[in-house]
Image (cartoon, grey):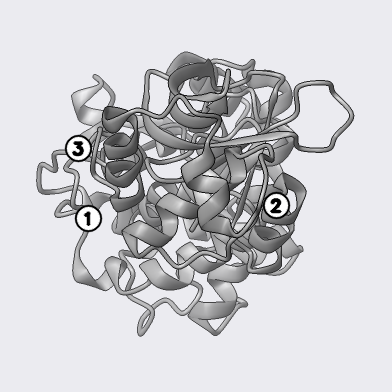
Amino acid sequence: MLFLSFFFVFFMLIAGSSSSTTHTASEEGENLPEAVLRWKDKVTKEATKNEIYEAVPYLLGIIMAESGGNSEKYPDIMQCSESQGKPPNSIKNPNESIEVGVKYFADMWKEHRDYDVLNIVQAYNFGGGFLSHSGKSYSLDNAIQFSKTQAGGKTVTYTNPIAISLGYDYRYAYGNMFYAQIVKQYITSTSNNNSQGNSTIVKAALKELDEGTHDGGTKYWQWYGFNGRVEWCAIFVSYNAEKAGVKMERFAYCPTGIENFKAKNQWLGKGSLPKSGNIIFFDWDGDSVSDHVGIVEKVENEVIFTIEGNSGDKIAKLNYEKNSPYIIGYGIP
């Protein structure tokens, strides 16, 4: 968002002091202090409600960059008052700040799903207008040029360690052209979260795959209570969720599963990156009605690996590109 000049000083102090220690990405988030991590549940709740669950690490990184999570000193911990057309720090409740900040981020994210997420992060600082100039791929040079143009070439001294490491001791006097880089240092890796077998439902499904079933899914539809064969992809998902102790309503009809997840704000829209153990829904014929479902095993390089029942009447491991036109979205049990 566009900062007023006196807020530039505040941001320099916050971003500068919070970056004075070298941080490395980790799977468990040790690079974020407890002052930020205490807001993780609230951020996750709001991100899920806004259908950007996978953005949680970036949102926590934004909190770190904006306020260090210090709501006692900076109640507007996401510094999002200006996104509502208000003066800086007008929001006096950290929970409200998260609600407003996450929605602001989500609106840009969902409108530009094919953009690099770092462009969305940078736009949180610059304002959404940046996305009209950034292109889909993030580039520090684009951020610098945008800031330079908006500032009319005016610069200010800036000694944040990230800027220094990039060869700068100044920035242009419009927003912070290093913002995405500053937030990026706090992003926790999701590689472990998406690795094989980290989810109990994935372990259960892999066990079923190893044992093999080639009898039309009899084991599963009989377990559900049917007396004769039915399409059993959703039943396979329900079976493994129950065997794994995952809290999820049973469903035998794919649209019912989607309704269940959406009703609980546990839905992740298409174009998003899911996590291991999420439930992936498909629409093969493009009529916006789901006709197949599976379990996300892992995600690697934006390729989604799945375990699916009733794929050719068997259990199969398959994979899809993140932006596959057949993917409707994901349930988050």
Closest to the observer, 85 or 302: 302
Which residue is under mark 2? 258
Residue 316 makes an appearance in the image: yes
Above or below, 71 against 244 in this view is below
Which residue is under mark 3? 161
Q: Residue furthest left?
A: 21
Q: Residues within 10 Å of mark 2 (few under 14, many from 20)?
A: many
Q: Earlier in the sequence, mark 3 or mark 2?
A: 3
Above or below, 170 against 261 in this view is above
Secondary structure under the numbered disc 2 in the rendered image: helix
The disc labelled 1 sits on which kind of residue?
A: Ser
Drawn side of residue 245 relative to residue 197, left or right: right
The disc labelled 3 sits on which kind of residue?
A: Pro
Closest to the observer, 35 or 18: 35
Residue 15, horizontal then vertical, whole percent: 31, 51
Q: Residues within 10 Å of mark 1 (few under 14, many from 20)?
A: many
Secondary structure under the numbered disc 3 in the rendered image: helix
Residues at circles 2 and 1 in contact by the CB criterion of under 8 Å: no
The disc labelled 2 sits on which kind of residue?
A: Ile
Secondary structure under the numbered disc 1 in the rendered image: helix
Residue 225, horizontal then vertical, whole percent: 60, 60
Which residue is under mark 1? 18
Residue 59 makes an appearance in the image: no
